[in-house]
Image (cartoon, helix red, strand yellow):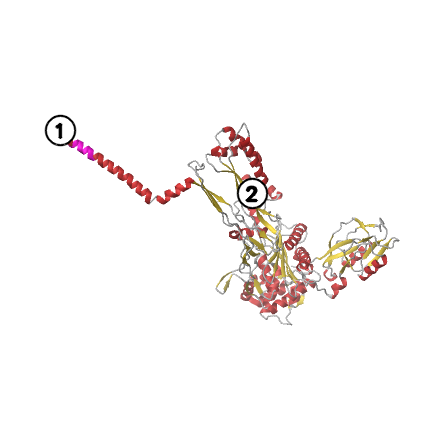
């Protein structure tokens, strides 16, 4: 009985133990279930959805960019991503066929495509952003494979619509427009600055999938459409921009400028930038491509240095020289100094400055030379500005003192960024740091050289806005390049409004300095920038560079010209700036930058509808335009020619004009000759064009008469400033018909800084 009892007890214990184990096991399972259904429920649901749904991003169409007249500059065009479903491919032969065909059409490596066909999923991107014709080739290739009687390859192709950025004029206004990366994100220019407006909002396509990515037996698809980006309208005028780019390019080439150059034009009353030409820039359609010369230099480097050199070259290419580069402004800053001493009432009608060729600004200091070693003698403020006399402006600087000098430096906006809506704007580099109202680090030598614009650095856009304030009555404007933002329906969602940052100088001082700048452009050192009839005002600058682009000591120069038009009621300001012209050719602002300024203004001002107002002297020398005399009676044609202050020369015995030279509507000087032919195929004779270069106006006129040629004059022709023929538009030695027109461009050459 004892044994039986013990056995029963043992069995009972086993049963209880088993029950306890079962209870514990179920408890663990139940607890785990409770844990998963409560604490982990949201996470597990998310993972389940991710496994069951395939979520594809639908690209939004990036907004377009237009110029001020509505001309298209940048747009996103439809392209396609080539996608396949490799999990549907079960046979090796099919994979090889697809890899070979797609690699050929898409210009890809066959092995790379083959490896993608082996993936076990239903969404493999083969190539992104292919054009419509390539997409059609891929589609036709896959269709042919599927329909082939022997092969019967499954149709695994998917075509996903995407967008690619396209810039209509390649390099045109590249520094303003910028470019985008592979993911359509703005990387420079307004593409970067206004990226949040341009990029739109991506959509989604959600499709149900099984565990291996295949379609579920029931249909499920949800599409959220993308919202296209807004459009930008720039203040840049395509016509003005084209003119500016043309003449900046010509100047860079003529003077072999080493570190690029730029020209910026602003409406002085609003701050709107009308043109912004930074040449030798990048092509937004190929922004990473370097020129052949740079590539050759990089390839000559050790291999481990090439990537770094390439990146540095690209960054330099993308750098906006007008807003990101600082430079020593030089003598163009003298317009600000003149404004300062006038504003402080320091200049009276009898105030005079003395220049004997050098000046020691304070006791014990070394003398600082004037560009004219013989000196300018006694000068008024206007004469000092026209002579660009450094000693006179040092005397003005010491009239002001350091604190007042800095007050006007701040007033003209040079101590802070302009706020232009372009990325990468640099700060100025001044002599000091300032704590409260106390100036630290600006000594008397700094004041002396700073008075004529040397040894501190600002950006070209800062100098332009300061000039704009001098021109517009003293208001320092905020410059801008985007005038409005609109949606896809054309509704304007945001417009730029002119913003006055503060009053820099009074209207009275503004008028006085504008008048001085006009005098400088008509009879002073700025004559090479003058355009007859348009009341130009301007100032040259030739500033010494202290360091080069890599931070090394430099003895090179920057040539610039900053001016306004029309000077009596300014509408526009323009700065032309060239970094390191070839010293062997010429490096002075009056010779390098001023003609570029003049050429731009000569085409832009008529386009803007600025009225011409000629002086009496200009009216006497004004060119005239030939009429259309063909089919007229000879006597009537001769009468019209004489009435136009021209001379007629009749060739032949006929009674009616059958041909003329120069042709109708050609600009020639008064007293020029028009040849009237009265018989067909009759020639008056041909002449070989002589060399007019380096001649004065009187000498050029005499030579033209000797060779039976008409000459058309451009540029500065005053004998009192040493003007000479810089270039001619017809090659020396060319054979032309007698009394044809040769255009001569005159310049004055001097060392005005």
Q: Residue reaching furthest top?
A: 150
Q: Is residue 145 above or below residue 228?
A: above
Number of numbered discs: 2
Residue situated in front as seen by the camera: 401 or 42: 42
* Residue 10 falls inside the magenta stretch: yes
Residue 75 visible: yes
> In which quarter of the view is residue 636 placed?
bottom right
> In which quarter of the view is residue 213 placed?
top left
Q: Is residue 467 left or right of residue 201?
A: right
- Rendered location of residue 665, percent (x, y): 76, 56
Q: Is residue 376 left or right of residue 678?
A: left
Check residue 380 in the rendering and tell me which mark sits there, or answer none.
none
- Rendered location of residue 718, percent (x, y): 73, 61
Q: Which residues are magenta?
A: 9-16
Q: Quadrant of the C terminus?
A: bottom right
Q: Residues within 10 Å of mark 2 (few under 14, many from 20)?
A: many
- Rendered location of residue 521, percent (x, y): 68, 62
Please give the residue where the numbered disc 2 appears in the rendered image.
79
SS at circle 1? helix
* Residue 575 falls inside the magenta stretch: no
> In which quarter of the view is residue 669 placed?
bottom right
CA gap, disc 1 and disc 2: 89 Å
Q: Residue reaching furthest front?
A: 218
Q: Residue reaching furthest right?
A: 653
Q: Quadrant of the N terminus?
A: top left
Please give the residue where the numbered disc 1 appears in the rendered image.
4
């Amino acid at each position: 009985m004892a044994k039986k009892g013990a056995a029963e007890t043992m069995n009972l214990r086993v049963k209880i133990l088993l029950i306890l184990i079962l209870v514990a096991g179920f408890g663990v399972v139940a607890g785990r279930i409770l844990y998963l259904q409560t604490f982990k429920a949201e996470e597990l649901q998310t993972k389940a959805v991710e496994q069951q749904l395939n979520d594809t991003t639908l690209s939004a169409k990036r907004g377009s960019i237009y110029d001020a007249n509505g001309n298209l500059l940048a747009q996103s065009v439809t392209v396609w991503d080539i996608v396949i479903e490799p999990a549907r491919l079960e046979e090796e032969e099919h994979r090889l066929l697809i890899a070979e065909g797609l690699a050929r059409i898409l210009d890809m490596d066959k092995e790379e495509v083959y490896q993608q066909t082996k993936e076990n999923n239903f969404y493999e991107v083969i190539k992104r952003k292919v054009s419509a014709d390539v997409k059609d080739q891929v589609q036709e290739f896959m269709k042919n494979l599927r329909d082939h009687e022997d092969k019967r390859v499954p149709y695994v192709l998917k075509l996903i619509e995407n967008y690619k950025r396209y810039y209509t004029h390649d390099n045109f206004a590249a520094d303003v427009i910028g470019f985008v990366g592979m993911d359509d994100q703005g990387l420079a220019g307004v593409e970067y600055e206004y990226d949040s407006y341009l990029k739109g909002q991506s959509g989604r396509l959600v499709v149900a999938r099984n565990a291996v990515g295949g379609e579920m037996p029931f249909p499920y698809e949800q599409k959220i459409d993308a919202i296209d980006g807004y459009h930008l309208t720039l203040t840049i005028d395509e016509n003005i921009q084209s003119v500016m780019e043309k003449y900046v390019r010509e100047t860079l080439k003529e003077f072999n400028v080493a570190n690029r150059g730029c020209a910026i034009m602003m409406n002085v009353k609003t701050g709107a930038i009308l043109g912004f030409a930074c040449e030798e820039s990048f092509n937004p359609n190929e922004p990473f491509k370097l020129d052949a010369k740079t590539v050759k230099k990089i390839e000559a480097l050790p291999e481990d240095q090439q990537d770094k050199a390439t990146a540095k070259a690209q960054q330099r290419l993308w750098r906006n020289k007008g807003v990101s580069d600082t430079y020593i402004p030089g003598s163009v800053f003298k317009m600000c100094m003149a404004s300062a001493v006038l504003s402080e009432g320091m200049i009276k009608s009898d105030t005079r400055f003395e220049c004997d060729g050098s000046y020691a600004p304070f006791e014990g200091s070394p003398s600082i030379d004037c560009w004219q070693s013989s000196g300018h003698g006694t000068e008024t403020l206007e004469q000092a500005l026209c002579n660009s006399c450094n000693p006179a402006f040092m005397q003005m600087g010491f009239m002001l003192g350091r604190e007042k000098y800095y007050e006007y430096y701040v007033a003209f906006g040079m101590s802070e960024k302009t706020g232009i809506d372009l990325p990468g704007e640099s700060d100025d580099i001044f002599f000091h740091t300032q704590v409260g109202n106390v100036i630290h680090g600006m000594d008397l030598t700094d004041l002396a050289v700073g008075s004529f614009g040397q040894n501190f650095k600002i950006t070209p856009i800062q100098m332009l806005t300061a000039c704009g304030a001098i021109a517009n009555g003293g208001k320092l404007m905020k410059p801008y390049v985007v005038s409005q933002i609109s949606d896809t329906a054309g509704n304007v969602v945001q417009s730029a409004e002119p913003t006055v940052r503060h009053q820099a100088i009074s209207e009275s001082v503004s008028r006085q300095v504008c008048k001085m700048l006009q005098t400088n452009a008509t009879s002073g050192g700025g004559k090479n920038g003058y355009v007859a009839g348009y009341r130009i005002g301007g100032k040259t600058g030739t500033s010494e560079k202290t360091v080069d682009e890599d931070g090394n000591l430099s003895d090179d120069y920057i040539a610039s010209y900053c001016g306004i038009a029309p000077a009596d009621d300014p509408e526009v300001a323009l700065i032309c700036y060239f970094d390191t012209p070839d010293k062997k050719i010429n490096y002075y602002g009056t010779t390098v930058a001023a003609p570029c300024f003049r050429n731009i203004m000569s085409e832009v001002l008529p386009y803007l509808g600025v009225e011409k107002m000629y002086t009496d002297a200009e009216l006497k020398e004004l060119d005239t335009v030939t009429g259309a005399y063909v089919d007229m009676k000879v006597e009537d044609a001769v009468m019209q020619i004489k009435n136009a202050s021209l001379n007629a020369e009749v060739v032949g015995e006929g009674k009616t004009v059958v041909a003329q030279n120069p042709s109708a509507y050609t600009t020639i000087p008064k007293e020029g000759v028009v040849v009237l032919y009265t018989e067909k195929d009759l020639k008056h004779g041909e002449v070989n064009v002589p060399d007019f270069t380096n001649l004065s106006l009187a000498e050029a006129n005499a030579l033209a008469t000797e060779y039976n040629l008409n000459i058309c004059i451009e540029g500065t022709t005053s004998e009192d400033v040493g003007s000479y023929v810089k270039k001619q538009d017809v090659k020396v030695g060319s054979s032309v018909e007698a009394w044809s027109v040769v255009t001569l461009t005159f310049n004055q050459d001097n060392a005005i800084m």
